Image (cartoon, rainbow, N blue to C red):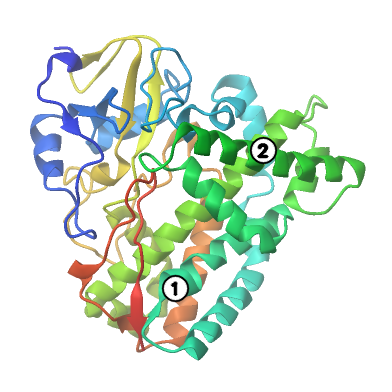
Amino acid sequence: MSWSERQPSLAYPLRREPVLEPPEEWTALRQRCPVARVTLPSGDEAALLTRYEDVRQVLADHRFTRRLTARDAARIADHESGGVFGSDMAAAIPDGGAAHRRWRRLVGQWLTAERVAALTPRIEARAGRLVDAMVEYGHPADLRAHLAFPLPVWVMCDLLGVPAGDRDRFARWSDVLLNLTRCTEEEYECAQDEFVDYLGAQVHARQAEPTDDLLGALVTARDTDGRRLSERELVFTGQALLVAGHETTMNVLAKMVALLLADRRRWERLLADRSLVPSAVEEVLRYDADPGLGVPRYLAEAAEIAGTLLPPGTTVLCDAAAANRDETAFEAAEEMELDRSPNPHLAFGAGARSCLGQALARAVLRTVLDVLLRRLPTLELAAPPADLRRLEGLAVGGLREVPVRW
């Protein structure tokens, strides 16, 4: 059966109430409709995957590409361009083959676990200063505003070598680029143009005078054939790192604290055994019910997934969060087990196109959790978990605020 014959089409993203809980539809979709027909904010349709094996297969399959600029690809956002997934940024970064491997080698050598480990003391010091400022502010306080927002953007600015004082501009640009429903085409194009012009100036400055930051290193880096990244690739690589590196980490960080404090026994267990911090972070990444829209892929040729034929031109949404709750892949999948091992979650994707910045994201999350456990052991939510509010309209899932006291 073709996926297009399946009725009815679900409005996507699916509603989550309360916000920390998964959508009610996940279990039924995995069991009875693993390839579901959904309607995106743009009004276009896509095929939604919710089973672990199906999502992992597609994420690792080179036939499913990021070419959402194709004429028959579904637009994601509700304005004409379809948003960031069909943008120049998405098109500029190679998606497969030798060009993609070359790009990953050039960029990935600066985001290895060893290089990230060298950054960790600075991340810890910055997190400590932000916690100090939050304590001085007094409680109740919004942990998202005081810690989860400023820290990841500072990390990315420090890594790339761009002024941290511009963080509000990055936040504004990212918010528009990742918005699905709340901005016009004109606002989107304006934010994109301003962001590209800004990073273009940063690249030009490093071409004139080399620097020892990541952007400066990428300007001079050469692959094994002696080739460098083009100016276009440099600009959009910088944009992708800033948008993904701060926006997604910010939202996961806020949700991590909310999830661990929503059931006080989780926090108490970590206080009793700090060695659980790394596995707890992995479990938060698996357990997070709202990382956002999912990973969109475009299919240029026919393929079969879960016994369903997907025709050429199909846009597929890989819901990694739903896959991470699949009982066939994880024992007691609906339970948060802080010592879960192994934990082959798909929060960072799978295969050759998995998230390039995952070592950095893990370092930020582990460092922040360790700092909070050490500095604020009495930390607790200042509102019932059911009262937490979701950030609406964004391609990435997040909370509007995380009120805490200590």
Residue type for callout 2: Val
- Counting from the top left corner in percent of width and height, residue 203 is at 78, 41
Asked whether residue 113 appears in the rendered view, the answer is: no
At 59% across and 52% down in the image, what residue appears?
A: 170
Q: Position of residue 289 (x, y in %)?
A: 26, 53
Q: Quadrant of the C terminus?
A: bottom left
Disc 1 versus disc 2: distance between alpha carbons? 34 Å
Q: Mark 1 points at which residue?
A: 369
The residue lying at 49 percent from left, 72 percent from top is 147
Locate the N terminus by quadrant.
Answer: top left
Query: What residue is drawn where x is 18% and y is 60%?
Result: 18
Q: Earlier in the sequence, mark 1 or mark 2?
A: 2
Residue 54 falls in which quadrant of the image?
top left
Question: What amino acid is labelled 1 in the image?
Answer: Leu
11 relative to 382 in the view: left or right:
left
Give residue 192's mark: none
Left or right: where 23 falls relative to 218:
left
Residue 178, percent from left and from top: 45, 43
Q: Which residue lies furthest to the right in this view?
A: 208
Residue 196: assigned label: 2
Secondary element type, mark 2: helix
Q: In which quarter of the image is residue 27?
A: top left
Give the answer, above or below, for where 366 lies relative to 236.
below
Which residue: 21% across, 42% down? 14
Image position of 274 (left or right of 388):
right
Q: Position of residue 79 (x, y in %)?
A: 40, 30
For label 1, the crowd category at 10 Å Cα-Cα, with few meaning under 14, some 14 to 19 and many 20 or more, is many
Q: In which quarter of the image is residue 125?
A: bottom right
Q: Is mark 1 on a helix, strand or loop?
A: helix
Other residues around mark 2 within 10 Å, as few (<14) / some (14–19) / many (≥20): some
Relative to residue 367, is residue 111 depicted above or below? above
